[in-house]
């Protein structure tokens, strides 16, 4: 009897270890995919460049947001699109929305006002892209070149395509997330959001 129980216990433990190994391999695969997408630059001609929002401090973009804006301006000046969309609403108590701050930054660097569209309602990546998609529909834009940080790009592209946007990604090459610790936290966050979004989409 005891031998049978031992065999049963070993069998259960064996299956538990197999499941744990599969879970670890899956998570490593998701993380590797997120890194791969972020390192792949798809910069190509498009109707519009969408710069995803990030924090702003009054009139000034945060270091993270500044690098996104600068990369969007660079793509615009390279002639890859004739229009920029800056996204991002108002933070708690903020006088200016993230997109207004980005617009001001771009104007000071020679981007003409008619080349800039903004939305001031969004607070999340999903909302950034929903608002950008609405602007694209209004102006009859089809293809968008999306700008964000490398580890954010996989989620951004996935959400954009789920909304019907013909999306390409161009991650900022000067992301402020450079240290091992900041990149690790960002990657773990994106792995979490990858699975959360799967759950949301399946409902």
Image (cartoon, helix red, strand yellow):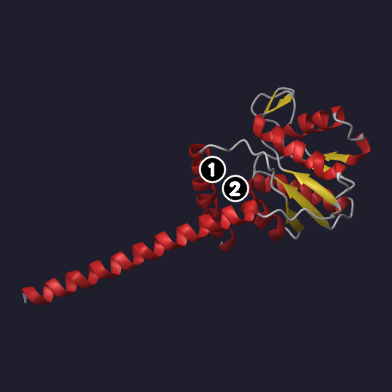
Q: Residue at x 71, y 39 (%)?
A: 68
Q: How far across and how far down the image is residue 143, in percent?
A: 82, 57
Residue 186: mark in rendering: 1
Q: Check disc 1 and report its element: helix, strand or loop.
A: helix
**Circles 2 and 1 in contact, beta carbons < 8 Å:** yes
- The answer, for residue 110, to whether it is visible in the render is yes
Q: Is residue 80 above or below residue 30?
A: above
Residue 151: mark in rendering: 2
Q: Quadrant of residue 86?
A: top right
Q: Residue at x 76, y 36 (%)?
A: 70
79 left or right of 195?
right
Residue 148: mark in rendering: none
114 left or right of 98?
right
Looking at the rendered image, the quarter that the N terminus falls into is bottom left
Q: Tag 2: Cα neighbours inside 10 Å, few (<14), some, or many (≥20)? A: many
Q: Residue at x 70, y 38 (%)?
A: 53
């Amino acid at each position: 009897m005891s031998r049978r129980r031992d065999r049963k216990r070993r069998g259960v433990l064996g299956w538990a270890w197999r499941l744990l190994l599969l879970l670890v391999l899956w998570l490593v695969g998701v993380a590797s995919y997120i890194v791969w997408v972020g390192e792949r630059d798809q910069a190509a001609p498009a109707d519009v460049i969408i710069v995803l929002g990030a924090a702003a401090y009054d009139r000034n973009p945060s270091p993270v947001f500044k690098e996104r804006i600068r990369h969007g301006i660079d793509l615009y000046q390279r002639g890859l699109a004739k229009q920029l969309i800056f996204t991002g609403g108002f933070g708690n108590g903020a006088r200016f929305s993230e997109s207004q701050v980005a617009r001001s930054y771009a104007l000071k660097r020679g981007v003409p006002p008619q080349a800039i569209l903004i939305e001031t309602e969004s607070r999340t990546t999903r909302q950034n892209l929903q608002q950008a998609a609405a602007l694209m529909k209004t102006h009859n834009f089809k293809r968008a070149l999306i700008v964000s940080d490398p580890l954010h790009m996989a989620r951004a592209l996935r959400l954009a395509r789920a909304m019907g946007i013909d999306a390409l990604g161009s991650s900022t090459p000067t992301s402020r997330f450079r240290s091992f610790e900041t990149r690790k936290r960002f990657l773990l966050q994106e792995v979490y959001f990858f699975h959360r979004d799967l759950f949301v989409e399946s409902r």
